[in-house]
Image: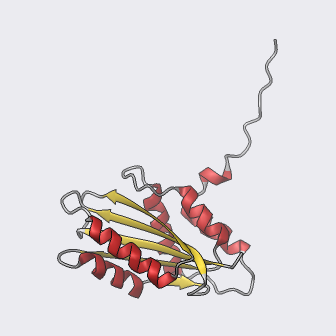
Amino acid sequence: MPTATTPAGPPDSETSLQPAQLLAQWERARSADSAQVTAELRTAFNQFVAEVLSDTQETNLELADVQDVLRQAIGLTVGRAEASGTGRAQQALQEAYQMAQAVGPGTAPQGQILILFQSRPDAELEMDELTDITETMWRNAGQEWELVFGHGIVPGLPAEIRLTFLLAPSSAQ
């Protein structure tokens, strides 16, 4: 019995996108009169997605999480910071908020938050630190926001912990 072969065709766009391509698609889908993504935001977003996609750590965040956020996002904010020592979780969160890069509305009644925690093997993130950060971010954003987080161990991380977040307000549905 003869077998039919299927032409190879382009790769599945949902799984083959690189960080820059994800952001470029999101930009094209937004209205022409919306604010432009800055170089700093582009760099922070690309770094966040590259770490989510990293083969060297299991973060419990996946490309699908980032894609879901972008599908509904009317704006983006990316914050990132590292900290060590006593109070490191709150220190990292405060610094990440201060250093955050944003485009679009800063607040909305609903949206999604992706949080990536990274720590050195000798200084893992404590459960109370995780709870403190996630509850603070959720309280600041609002009860209608969905929060997803992941954690990865990074040997050689300069500080004890690194916190990176992606806030994506969405329009009311």
State the image coordinates of residue 84 (x, y, percent, origin top left). 21, 74
Residue drawn at 17 percent across, 75 percent down:
85
Is residue 18 visible in the rendered structure shown here? no
Q: Is residue 90 left or right of residue 42?
A: left
Image quarter in which the C terminus is found: bottom right
Residue drawn at 46 percent across, 67 percent down:
48
State the image coordinates of residue 132 (x, y, percent, origin top left). 33, 75
State the image coordinates of residue 93 (x, y, percent, origin top left). 35, 80
Q: Nearer the viewer, residue 136 or 157?
A: 136
Residue farthest along the top direction in this orientation: 1
Image quarter in which the N terminus is found: top right
Q: Is residue 12 left or right of residue 160?
A: right
The tally of labels here is: 0
Q: Is residue 60 above or below residue 91?
A: above
Q: How is the image coloured?
A: secondary structure
Q: Nearer the viewer, residue 107 or 144?
A: 144
Is residue 110 visible in the rendered structure shown here? yes
Residue drawn at 52 percent across, 82 percent down:
142
Say which quarter of the image contains residue 28. bottom right
Q: Nearer the viewer, residue 75 or 86?
A: 86
State the image coordinates of residue 89 (x, y, percent, origin top left). 28, 75
Q: Nearer the viewer, residue 9 or 171?
A: 171
Residue drawn at 41 percent across, 66 percent down:
116
Q: Is residue 146 left or right of residue 47?
A: right
Say which quarter of the image contains residue 67. bottom right
Q: Is residue 93 above or below residue 147?
A: below
